Image (spheres, helix red, strand yellow):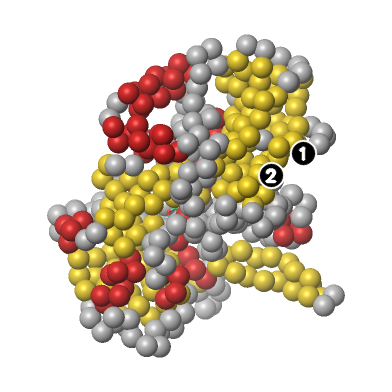
Amino acid sequence: MEERAAPRERFDRREILVSGSAASGVLLLAGGGFALAAEAGEQLIPWADQPPPVPPPAQGVVKTLTPWESLDSWITPNDKFFGVGHYEWPAINAATWRLNVVGQVGAPLGYALNDLKARPRQEVTFTLECSGNNGLPFLTSAIGNAKWAGASLADILEAAKIKGGAKEVVFFGADRGDEVLRPGTPLELKFTENFARSMSIDDAMNPANILCYEMNGEPLPAARGAPVRLIAPGWFGIANVKWLRRIEVLETRFMGSFMAHEYVTVREESRDGETVVEQTSVGRGLLKSAPARVTRTGSGYRVDGMAWGPTPITAVEVKIDGGAWTKATLAEADNSPFAWRFWHLDWAATPGEHSITSRAIDAAGNVQPAMDDPRIANKKTYWESNGQITRQIRIV
Ligand SMILES: Nc1nc2c(c(=O)[nH]1)N[C@H]1C(S)=C(S)[C@@H](COP(=O)(O)O)O[C@H]1N2
Ligand SMILES: [Mo]
């Protein structure tokens, strides 16, 4: 876990961003809501329920997490972006790197980095969240919002001429590791596999998808998947394959470890009075919000947070202790359908221990589920955890 920045440092950072490069200034203004930007004299009150450190077995996978309290700008700076990777992070020479598009295509293609950069540039501001976020005690704040730029995936698939009858597009990363099926049995099978995820042809052809080489105006950092990663706006982190190496079109369903074994949600459902188990591959992002931080300015308190999901957020409500749900103030809407929305609530806090819960509501009236909602309570795995988050705070 990174150390929490002191309020003074955060204030300085904002000054630099606003008065610094024009590009950064535009990013900040485009967000519409710098609700979390530190004000002079503002004091951050850390949550009393800090997450435990990432345990050693998971440290190889969860590499960086910036605490919620420090995720205080609408665009998450590259140095604060969380990092998840399942195998050793590969070192790739961008000068010799090539991306091949092969399989069930009429015109197999190969691109060097400069070939991709020569194509029309497409940008998207997208909040990337690990589907394990808030599913495990130590895995919180595995989320960040960035402006990604790259080449349109749909244009490239179009140029490759996908054959009739093809079913899926598989995105292979350069990172690889050992997997085992039926461990400890006579039928045990060990093999080495590249990280890979697939999408239906329809999902892959979504015009929002990009082969991304730039993040927040800088070349895509090595840890974020350089030289090129898939950015699939609206999908959980897992779909956004880093260190892309090969795109392969298949005429069957792809059942790699990260589609079929890992990142599978197991949920009990009731069907005609019978309890059945459904296993589904982790998919699109879900309606969710989080209280991110509490600050005091003079004698006033304020709760800041964010809300995100597949549909526009129309309201966020906050519950303090056992009280009524109260509407938070949403930051000005921007034109980024895939980005989180900031919100805040002024709070006349009294000394003592308090709990703070938030819930997001979308235009269709969907409400982020409570933790005891059957959708959440009957979920056996920690992925896709969009239940309401409750935080604890001590006011002195
Ligand atoms: N090649 C590759 N891509 C990957 C992964 C990986 O292990 N290997 N992890 C995925 C997961 S689970 C998440 S949450 C995001 C994290 O992206 P970030 O490290 O850039 O924040 O990358 C996804 N893409
Ligand atoms: Mo993830």
| Residue furthest left in the image | 95
Q: Identify the residue shown where x is 40% and y is 24%.
A: 14
Point out the image quarter for the C terminus: top right
Contact (Cβ within 8 Å) of mark 2 with mark 1: yes
Q: Which mark is residue 137?
A: none
Q: Quadrant of residue 28?
A: top left
Q: According to the image, label 2 marks what residue?
A: 359
Mark 2 or mark 1, which has the lower sequence index?
Answer: 1
In the rendered image, the vertical position of residue 115 relative to residue 54, given as above or below: below
Q: Identify the residue shown where x is 76% and y is 32%.
A: 320
Ligand 1: quadrant of the figure: bottom left
In the rendered image, the vertical position of residue 312 relative to residue 79, given as above or below: below
Q: What element carries label 2?
A: strand
Q: Is residue 184 left or right of residue 210?
A: right
Amino acid carrying mark 2 in the image: Arg
Q: According to the image, label 1 marks what residue?
A: 325
